[in-house]
Image (cartoon, rainbow, N blue to C red):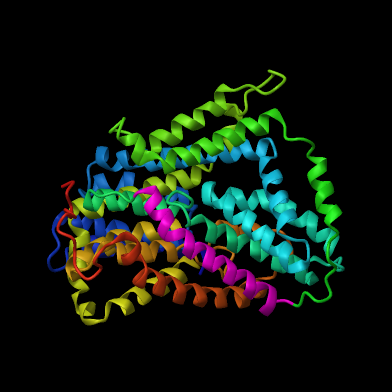
Amino acid sequence: MSQGFRIILGPFLFIFFYFFIGPLDGMNDASHAIFCSVLWIASWWITEAIPIPVTSLLPLVLFPTFGGLDLTSTASAYGNKIIFFYMAGFFLAIAMEKWNLHKRIALNIIYYVGLDKKSMILGFMIATAFLSMWLSNTSTSIMMLPIGIGVVSQVSLQNNLLKSNFGKVLMLGIAYSASIGGFATLYGTPPNLILTSNIEQYFNQSIDFTSWLIMALPLSCMLLIICWFYLTNFTFDLTSVNNISKNNIYNKVKELGKIKYEEKIVLIIFILFIIGLLLKSRISEIIPSIDDTIIAIFISMFLFLFSSSDKKQKIINWEDCYKLPWGIILLFGGGLSLAAAMQTSGLTLWIGDQLQYINSIELIFIVLIIVFSVNFLTEITSNLATVSMLLPILASISLSFDIHPYIIMVSATIAASCAFMLPVATPPNAVVFGSGYLKMSDMVKTGIVMNFISIIIVSIYVYYLLPILWGIDINTFPPEFNFLSLD
């Protein structure tokens, strides 16, 4: 598909449906305007006709111009509270990387897990998944990549990167575990943040951080172990790979020296960050207005308050924050404005009504279809863009089908973090593909198996265990969920 065609496709779809087709049966003028705008935005997101973050600014132009949503409401989505939570998490990632705390955590986990070939890969995957639970999976994979490359150079007998089987398995292990670990916490990956925002916006409900952890952490651990077993036993031959001496990893830890003052400060703030989120419900008994974002921003500010041991600089300064992923922040805003416009215009209800014909299908098969569709759609477009487009529709479907919205919205959200096949699917995939150890064919033939494994496990787990862990009835729409309560 040529660049010119990809650019023209979006405006063509908008003009054709807006000016020549007109509102479809049951649509009002506002929902028709949003429908046409979504066609343009979605086509540019999927084809990447222009950079995805730039496409994410289109709602600011299209929605108010054609009467879908006023400019103030559209723009307010770009300042949603989850965006500031994400920024706070990235401040922590920047501090960890600046003072090498991530290396100390990762190398110690690897050292204690074991140093034969398979155990070392497990150690890398555990370290990556743990960091990704609390930090951006993008920054985690970037942090772990140089550590992994350094270890591969000591283990692999191959000078040619593309022939290093250990390098291939380790790189894939880092990418997959960054994605798998990310969905274990409510704020570990951007799609989870979009889910929380949609739940609040559509149903005036919230998902507690601890409740999500209780539900998602076992699933994450299960997928991580299965992924490790699959990678080390069924993908690339590791029999010719040398084991690494325990002294090599120990020496890498020794090179870092004793834990520095700055690392201690970052570690303490990191622990307080986690404790604060876990204890939010207790804190709310004293401060009723407390929120995860308030906790995250407040605690992350201490990174700018404490000075280094030589008093010459702060733990992090604003210049360090130029590394913030502004593109993802704009994508957050675009996705949230899309959800708000689809909600207030009534487009989501209209779409739900059009899908009534699949209501006769058993719920477990609906879940399986959604997980499968999201998984493979995420292979060709951003997982954040995917959930931004689909979650508002699924919210409406849950009402139309008289089912609990969590069963399909949580399934779709987790599935968006389980695309393992292509470099463009997730940022961790792209990061490790750039290492030079992997060919496209390596990723496709390995990732497609993991895709199907994750589709089956996620579908079964969410359908059977989520209702038990959260105490919900998935076969009915809960009366306390006030759909479109913000209208």
Q: Residue at x 59, y 49 (%)?
A: 131
Count of all numbered marks drawn on residues in the image = 0
Residue 350 image point, x, y percent: 18, 64
Q: Nearer the viewer, residue 289 or 190?
A: 289
- Whether residue 44 appears in magenta in the rendering, the answer is no
Q: Residue at x 22, y 71 (%)?
A: 475
Q: Relative to 486, is 116 above or below?
A: below
Q: Residue at x 52, y 73 (%)?
A: 451
Q: Nearer the viewer, residue 437 or 67?
A: 437
Q: Relative to 196, is 302 above or below?
A: above
Q: Nearer the viewer, residue 431 or 404?
A: 404
Name the side, left or right, on which 215 lies relative to 106. left
Location of residue 258 by image quarter: top right
Residue 216 in view, yes or no: yes
- Whether residue 220 appears in magenta in the rendering, the answer is yes
Residue 353 image point, x, y percent: 17, 69
Question: Predominant secondary structure in magenta?
Answer: helix
Q: Relative to 131, is 264 above or below?
A: above
Q: Residue at x 69, y 53 (%)?
A: 109
Residue 53 image point, x, y percent: 46, 49
Name the side, left or right, on which 50 lies relative to 312. left
Name the side, left or right, on which 39 lies relative to 358. right
Residue 474 image point, x, y percent: 25, 68
Q: Nearer the viewer, residue 349 or 37?
A: 349
Location of residue 389 by image quarter: bottom left
Residue 433 in view, yes or no: no
Q: Find the magenta span and give its range.
A: 208-236
Name the residue furthest top: 311
Q: Relative to 100, is 247 above or below?
A: below
